């Protein structure tokens, strides 16, 4: 009999008020004493009254804030993972717009616009062809684009033709397709140094394979090259023509050759060294 009286007592006193709550006189619902909004809802069903608990305004706000922070943490960890996968060379992670020393202002501006308008470029499967002399900052420019897009959550892979050719050389031909197709999971593929294929038929074949696969999948790519526009437009043979035609069709050329940055850096280092030596 005792148990019945206990449950009856519970029934008569249906909800326990927490320390920061009160029972609102007018509505007879539980309210938060901090934000003075309801922590209980009332649904009038045909056969009974249903009064479940709910979040008050300050609880809902705190919940949203926690969710926002959790999503931000998840986003940042995804960006970090994408960066370690997409930029296997750690040097590339230093190629950022923030680290730009301003040697190619016009081109840098175009690179920023590429990032800003990325979704348009992606939609039209258009990329860039950064061409110019050795040491003018093409890889830096491409790296800046890679890092900026990675920061926006876009998975980017940046590699170079020499590395790709090394990998492909060691593979059975059946594995090569799968390897080249694996880049389709990256919305943007950046490949440094088109032109290394000049000296071997195998290399030309593989470079064509990489470019053609990207071309057919309609995914954008950024290619850098030391070749001149003259060489790209008038290749020596058909094998190269096939490659360069596809690149020129999908990649807007940007000439990067204002100054030789490597020389400038060497000169600056030399000047600093001389200063340190007291010369
Ligand atoms: Zn509250």
Image (tube, rainbow, N blue to C red):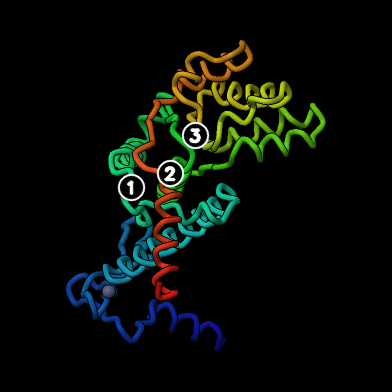
Label 2 beta carbon less than 8 Å to ligand 1: no
Q: Residue at x 60, y 17 (%)?
A: 240
Residue reaching furthest to the top = 238
Secondary structure of the residue carrying numbered label 2:
loop
Q: Nearer the viewer, residue 111 or 116?
A: 111
Q: Are marks 1 and 3 in contact (CB under 8 Å)?
A: no
Image position, residue 147 (x, y; %):
44, 49
Counting the numbered discs, the total is 3
Give the Cα separation between the discs numbered 2 and 3. 10 Å
Is 153 placed left or right of 206 in the picture?
A: left
Q: Nearer the viewer, mark 1 or mark 3?
A: 1
Q: Which residue is mark 1?
A: 103
Residue reaching furthest to the front = 279
Q: Residue at x 79, y 27 (%)?
A: 174
Image position, residue 132 (x, y; %):
43, 33
Secondary structure of the residue carrying numbered label 3:
strand
The image's mark for residue 137 is 2
Q: Which residue is mark 3?
A: 224
Give the Cα separation between the discs numbered 2 and 1. 8 Å
Secondary structure of the residue carrying numbered label 1:
loop
249 in relation to 220, above or below: above
Ligand 1 rendered quadrant: bottom left
Q: Are marks 2 and 1 in contact (CB under 8 Å)?
A: yes
Give the Cα separation between the discs numbered 1 and 3. 17 Å
Is 9 placed left or right of 46 in the picture?
A: right
The part of the image, by quadrant, that contains residue 166 is top right
Mark found first going from the N terminus, 2 or 1:
1
Which quadrant of the rendered structure holds the C terminus?
Answer: bottom left
Mark found first going from the N terminus, 2 or 3:
2
């Amino acid at each position: 009999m005792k148990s019945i009286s206990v449950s009856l007592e519970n029934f008569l006193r249906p909800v326990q008020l927490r320390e920061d709550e009160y029972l609102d006189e007018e509505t007879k619902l539980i309210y938060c004493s901090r934000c003075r909004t309801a922590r209980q809802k009332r649904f009038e069903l045909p056969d009974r009254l249903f009064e479940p608990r709910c979040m008050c305004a300050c609880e809902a706000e705190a919940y949203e804030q926690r969710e926002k922070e959790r999503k931000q943490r998840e986003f940042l960890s995804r960006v970090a993972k994408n960066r370690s996968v997409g930029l296997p060379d750690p040097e590339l992670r230093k190629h950022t717009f923030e680290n730009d020393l301003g040697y190619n202002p016009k081109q840098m501006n175009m690179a920023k616009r590429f990032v800003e308008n990325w979704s348009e470029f992606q939609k039209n499967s258009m990329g860039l062809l950064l061409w110019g002399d050795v040491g003018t900052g093409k890889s830096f420019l491409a790296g800046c684009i890679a890092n900026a897009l990675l920061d926006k959550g876009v998975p980017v892979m940046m590699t170079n033709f020499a590395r790709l050719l090394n990998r492909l050389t060691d593979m059975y031909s059946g594995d090569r397709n799968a390897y080249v197709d694996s880049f389709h999971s990256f919305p943007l593929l950046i490949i440094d140094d088109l032109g290394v294929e000049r000296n071997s038929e195998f290399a030309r074949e593989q470079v064509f394979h990489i470019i053609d696969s990207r071309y057919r999948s309609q995914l954008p790519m950024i290619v850098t090259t030391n070749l001149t526009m003259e060489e790209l437009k008038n290749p020596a043979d058909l094998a190269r023509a096939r490659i360069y035609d596809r690149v020129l069709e999908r990649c807007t050329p940007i000439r990067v050759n204002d100054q030789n940055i490597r020389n400038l850096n060497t000169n600056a280092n030399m000047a600093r060294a001389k200063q340190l030596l007291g010369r």
